[in-house]
Image (cartoon, grey):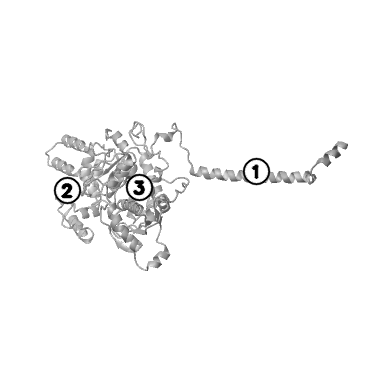
Amino acid sequence: MADEVRARKALPPGSRTFGAGGWRRTATRTWILRLGSSILIWTALMQLTSVWHPRPPKSSPAACFDGRGAATAGNGGRDLNGSTNLSVLDGEEHALFGSRSSPPALLPRRLYKSNGYLKVSCNGGLNQMRAAICDMVTIARYLNLTLVVPELDKISFWADPSDFGDIFNVDHFINSLRDEVKIVRALPKKFSKKIHTEPFSMPPVSWSSLKYYSKEILPLVRKHKVVHFNRTDARLANNGLPLHLQKLRCRVNYKALRFTPAIEALGNKLVSTLQRSGFFVVLHLRYEMDMLSFSGCTHGCSAKETEDLTRMRYAYPWWKEKEIISEKKRSEGLCPLTPEETAVVLRALGFTRDTLIYIASGEIYGGERRMASLRAAYPRIVRKEMLLSAEELNPFQNHSTQMAALDYQVSVASDVFVPTYDGNMAKVVEGHRRYNGFRKTIVLDRRELVKLLDLLQDGNVSWDQFSTAVMELHKGRMGQPTLRMVLHGRPKEEDYFYSNPHECTGSSRIRHTESREFDI
């Protein structure tokens, strides 16, 4: 007892207040502090994991595919049956055929002093506008401009009222490029009120170099604050750009320009339906009224059809060439193959009668009458209208650009792509397929083909001679890796950047695969 008393006396002043209640309060405060610290640490960890994605081990299935979803194994990305497996796509390339389950973290914004605003009104069909958008983003990046979301063509032959947001995912377009260029949906209202006038409008010179844009366009932007390009087709050179800008063109084309969820979903359904049937070919049969009228190609048409096509050509003032000799253009390889010619060429190339063929095009001029021989040779011909219900297609009716977007997705995904004319869709799809691992695209040599076709029709060569000649002619025209042909001062005649963006496929990869065989 005496010891306890001495112990209490030995305690420092104030320590006696820590009775049972005091210890409970201290324990409660300690618990609250620990809980708060745990919450802070957990929040920090969640933030870190949202921006850091560890690489899968090399033994994982994803390691069998490169950055573009193409198999890197020795079989060239094909399964044992020889068909390309498109069911496995990595997170980046999946953007073309579907959306990710959760949005990626935003890229850090590139900070720069903007020299002004660039507005653009695209002209032409889907793929001409697609390439133009890539060019306009690149020009805005080079000149340090703020780009306004592009306007799409509503007045050309197609008369499609679709806006940019009806075709492409606007949010993804803006956010996926924020580390390169600032893109806004519209000019700021206060800025529009300030100038009180329409923006300075002009068409830039076709196939222009970067020097033209820095010397001629940049001073105009600085002067007027806003410059509007009222034409955008082929306004940037194919070659002579720094590597990082060429790669930016690819990034816009293959990553930023993602179709809307509705278009992607329906495109996915088309691709899945075709793939379930096995190997399939997409035939871009560009035998449509606008193309025949524009090109003046009337081979196989009746006198009445020729008259209608000529009248239409004169009705469109922006189609500059009016007097055209059809047979001369055909002999120069400047006309699309007719459906009848296409049937003969496909057979000569080795496609068997049971080949599943998807027709990617609008309405064929002449209708079923002109398609009869092609259907007789290949009964398994389908179109999107045959694979989808009227209810599914109804939202896209009278919107030719949106319908073309569906065909674009199927064309990129096909086992073989065969365009009968080297228009914008043929070129842009060819480039996309090269980017996706040099997928087979048969680029028809129409100039030589029409000679062979005429010889066959006149009985001057046998079928075996014709078929052998056609096969030999196209051995090196199957979408193999190659460098673009550059013709200084002749941009229209040289290889188009978007048909062969070799800067984005890797020169080492090109050298490695130059000797690969592309059998049909």
What residue is disc 2 on? 330
Q: Position of residue 92 (x, y in %)?
A: 41, 43
Image-quadrant location for residue 229: bottom left
- Residue 223 drawn above or below residue 291: below
Where is residue 78 shown, x and y percent of the image?
34, 34
* Tag 3 residue: 248
Q: Secondary structure at mark 2?
A: helix
Residue 55 visible here: yes
For label 3, the crowd category at 10 Å Cα-Cα, with few meaning under 14, some 14 to 19 and many 20 or more, is many
> In the figure, is residue 194 to the left or right of 306?
right
Callout 1: SS: helix
Q: How far is the residue under mark 2 from the one under mark 1? A: 82 Å
Residue count near mark 2 (Cα–Cα under 10 Å), binned few <14, some 14–19, many ≥20:
many
**Residue bearing mark 1:** 34
SS at mark 3 in the image:
helix
Q: Amino acid at mark 2?
A: Arg
> 446 or 497: nearer the eye?
497
Side (left or right) of 372 relative to 248: left
Instruction: Kindly indicate whether the residue at mark 2 contacts the one at mark 3 (C-beta within 8 angstroms).
Output: no
In front: label 3 or label 2: 3
The C terminus is located in which quarter? top left
CB-based contact (under 8 Å), mark 2 and mark 1 = no
Three-letter amino acid code of the residue under disc 1: Arg
Residue closer to the observer: 412 or 205: 205
Judge by depth and name the residue closer to the eye, 49 or 89.
49
Q: Where does residue 400 sit, x and y in percent of width and height?
A: 32, 54
Q: Position of residue 266 (x, y in %)?
A: 39, 48
